[in-house]
Image (cartoon, rainbow, N blue to C red):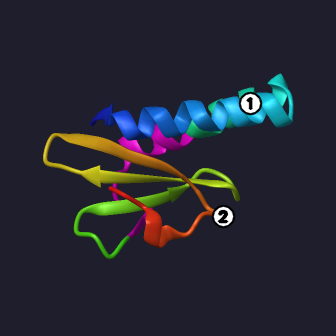
Amino acid sequence: MEVVWTKKAEQDYYQQIDYLLDHWNVEVAESFIDSVFQTIAYISENPQLYASTDIPQVRKAVVNKHVSIFYHVGMDKITLLRLWPNRQNPEKLDL
């Protein structure tokens, strides 16, 4: 199934990479990138694999203990809504 990114999801993704490069190193950033794209591949293969949320047709995939992907499952595509840091208050999540 086709996977598309929202602008917010793209911004979240690049912010996470910038943070990792600023505070850690290239290897950690590359590992994060690999984990994100592996999770997206799992989502694409089986959109119902991850936990549903209180929002209809929105699911949450945990990439690692620090970041989760929120995504919408449509009829013909999957929309990545946000890459959300797990340490942040989920009530502030703007989908």
* Residue 32 located left or right of residue 42: right
Image quarter (top left, top right, bottom left or bottom right) of the N terminus: top left
Q: Position of residue 50 (x, y in %)?
A: 44, 62
Which residue is rendered at x = 28% and y = 43% of the image? 78
- For this rendering, which residue is in front, 45 or 68? 68
Above or below, 93 relative to 22? below
Q: Earlier in the sequence, mark 2 or mark 1?
A: 1
Residue 86 in view in this figure: yes
Q: How far is disc 2 from disc 1 in space, using C-alphas?
A: 18 Å
Between circles 2 and 1, the one closer to the viewer is 2
Q: Quadrant of residue 26?
A: top right
Residue reaching furthest to the top: 26
Above or below, 52 relative to 44? below
- Give the residue number, with chain letter if any, for mark 2: 87
Residue reaching furthest to the front: 92
* Residue 28 located left or right of residue 50: right
Image quarter (top left, top right, bottom left or bottom right) of the C terminus: bottom left
Q: Position of residue 62 (x, y in %)?
A: 57, 57
Q: Position of residue 5 (x, y in %)?
A: 35, 34
* Residue 33 located left or right of residue 28: left
Specify whether residue 46 is painted magenta. yes
- Give the residue number, with chain letter if any, for mark 1: 29
Q: Residues within 10 Å of mark 1 (few under 14, many from 20)?
A: some
Span of residues in magenta: 37-52
**What's the residue type where badge 1 is placed?**
Ala
Which residue is rendered at x = 39% and y = 40% of the image? 8
- Judged from the image, the secondary structure of the residue bearing numbered disc 2 is loop
Residue 37 in view in this figure: no
Residue reaching furthest to the bottom: 54
- For this rendering, which residue is in front, 22 or 66? 22
